[in-house]
Amino acid sequence: MIEYDGSQNLIILSNNEISYVIYINNFGYLETLYFGKKLSNYNGILKSKELSDNGPTYFDLKKRKEQRFEDGFKIDASCLELSSHGFMDKRYSPIILETENGSFENEFLYVSHRIYSGLPKFHNSFSHAYGEKSDTVEILLKDSKERIYVKLFLSILDDKNILIKNLEIINKTKKEIKLHRAMSMQLDLPSNDYYLTYFPGRWSFERQISENLIHPGTQEISSNFGRSSHDYNPFVYLRKKDANNEYGEVIGLNLIYSGNFKLNIESGFYLDTKITYGINDEDFCWILNPKETFKTPQAVISYSYSGVDKMSQTFHDFIRQNLITYKKQGEYKSILFNSWEGCYFDFNTDLILSYIDKAKEIGSELFVLDDGWFSNRDNDYSGLGDWFVNKKKIDLHKAINHCKDLGMKFGLWFEPEMISYNSNLFKSHPSYCLGDIKSKKLYLGRHQFHLDFSNPNVIDYIFMQMCKILDEYEIDYIKWDYNRIVGEHFSSFYPKEQQGEIYHRLVLGYYSLLERLTNKYPDIMIEGCASGGGRFDLGTLYYCPQIWGSDESDPVQRLFINYNTSLGYPLSTIGTHVNDNKFMSYKNKASLALFGTYGYEMNPHKLNSQEIDDINDIANLYKKYHKEVIEEGDMYHLISPNDTNYFCAQCVSKNKSKSLVILVNKLKELDEFRYIKLKGLDSKSLYKNNYDNNVYTGEYYMNIGLNLSKEWLFEFECKLIVLEKI
Ligand code: GLA
């Protein structure tokens, strides 16, 4: 619900659990007064904002008089929705623009607001949130000098503690303006006693966890790789010093965007916290012509006063119910077998047919032919950009028919945004490459160039090529890969004045191709991938209901990656496969993969009959429980592998009737007392478990805990426990 309280000039956003209060001050600035647990009334709240009156004053040039800001407002210290830039407030501002006279000053002041139900309309081909159970306030602000306007959008969901923020900049002057920074939001908090948790990583080691106290100065979590990157994920959270998994205030943040992002956290002399989040302004300069607008991506805030897990669960539900657009979202997902780690580029039709047979034997329902099926692609030096079947290598019709005869679906790998120097496309259209092809060199990443996806002709061309394949062959699934970063970001398609737009235009190009393909082939499921998890973000999830979590599919390393990823993203989105790794048994590996999308990626001919049986046991559990418990259920992070000897996670179906629990110990465990206390069950109901085969109440499991003390646990032993309400 959103109300306007005219007597106090307040805009109040609330749902059953939280409130967010903005005060429109006498000067036209929007002050953020409150963000937290729901308040029953807002009387006297204006008192909370009054600061000492030793702040900057100004000289009114018309009245020839020094003026003081009134009502306790301190322009360089108050908590604001949108700071000015180039005046006395030296804190970070989400917007920097240059007007025709070369001025960098901007100060956006209140004009009007509009409250409506639902979320704001977004233009097509740009990932964004949806959902009717929500309200939005759209606040119009005008620059104090120029006819430049900003619309500040702020939405609250009724059924989740989620706020969504973004800005739109509108040029009503008669001259172009230059946006040097156009971020999505600002969130000012009146204290800095928070820990910041974020997820740095690298290839095959994505989303490790890092935590530090907010400290005076500036901290930045960002990407300038042209994608959200392996290096820093756009998901972060702030946790009050005394908060933990179950208790206390936690504020999660993410951005619905797949390109360069920047989260700036500033804490200054006043010991407050100022968060600014949006598109990275490095090399960014967007020319905004008269009458044009620039819409920034949406930033999403998940608020919890009941610890980290509640913040995570809120994000999970938001992603599944308000973000992913795939038409079959929430339906049963077929068990996937991917050819890559089994045979890499080295296959022929017979081998693939034999893989399909074996895949079927271990319960697969979807066979995916990964890289190497097209052009002259027998290694990673060639072929990208030439999307035609290499008929000498693979009879694709035969492979697909074989799948269909066995009742299986079929999927193919693509890397649409890339071009090999050894390709027909590079010979015929060198200018389709990103970077200056007239210069002496172009950098390569995995031996390939980046296509210029800011150029609509390139998108048309790739779209056409992909359609030819998708029209001729019956394809149910696409793995959309992206194996290099953006280096040179010069586009020969745009004039020199617009080169500062290219990074963002590449993202728009990525979304526009996804939009066209998902519109034309709505049944095809697209799984995102970028050398593993280099583009694991909300922008991608809007189109792709799952993303390959990491090229590290060894279960031990994956345990950390999946655990950390699931703090911000639901397990149903984390592409997870059982591979050939010998460190763990297939039973254990498959049990772990259940806590992800579940699939296989191995040489299936190496499996013995016992292993096939073990895998099938788990595949049957997947078929029985995945949709209700993992795909749709609530997840609890019971024990973190980051700082203990165990990894323990639990998922519970929304109706609390079924639950899966996984416990893994890292080192050999000799503890005498070992109980796991479960969560999310119905305390009065009786549940049978398959560990000691006893029946206990939910209350027992949650308070006394399931006793696992009877046995030693050896290195990386895995216990998968199933609970069913009786
Ligand atoms: C990337 C992906 C892998 C695989 C290869 C194919 O590395 O992450 O899963 O698809 O490309 O070249």
Image (cartoon, helix red, strand yellow):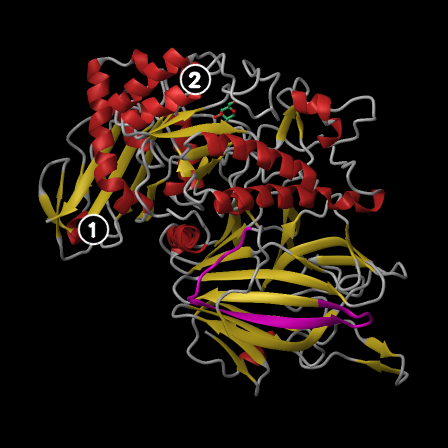
The residue pinned by badge 1 equals: 703
**Counting other residues with Cα less than 10 Å from the Cα at mark 2, is it few (<14), some (14-19), or many (20 or more)?**
some
Instruction: Give the amino acid type for the residue marked by disc 1 in the picture.
Output: Asn
Residue drawn 24% across the image and 30% down it: 619
The answer to whether the beta carbon of the residue marked 1 is less than 8 Å from any atom of ligand 1 is no
Secondary structure under tag 2 reads loop
> Which quarter of the picture shows residue 455?
top right
Q: Which residue is mark 2?
A: 395
722 left or right, relative to 245: left
Q: CA distance from mark 1 to mark 2?
A: 58 Å
Give the residue at x 82% y 67%.
173
- Corner quadrant of residue 8: bottom right
Q: Relative to 38, is 636 above or below?
A: above
Q: Is residue 212 visible?
A: yes
The local crowd at label 1, few if under 14, some if 14 to 19, many if 20 or more residues have their Cα within 10 Å, is some
Query: Which mark's residue is nearer the viewer, 1 or 2?
Result: 2
Callout 2: CB less than 8 Å from ligand 1: no
User: Does the magenta portion include 145?
Assistant: yes
Disc assigned to residue 681: none
**Image quadrant where residue 243 sits:** bottom left
Mark sitting earlier along the chain (1/2): 2
Q: Secondary structure at mark 1?
A: helix
- Which amino acid type is marked by label 2? Asp
Q: Residue furthest bottom?
A: 7
The residue shown at (79%, 27%) is 437
Residue 9, magenta (yes or no): no
Q: Which residues are magenta?
A: 127-149
Q: Looking at the picture, how far across and down is residue 484, in whole percent?
A: 62, 28
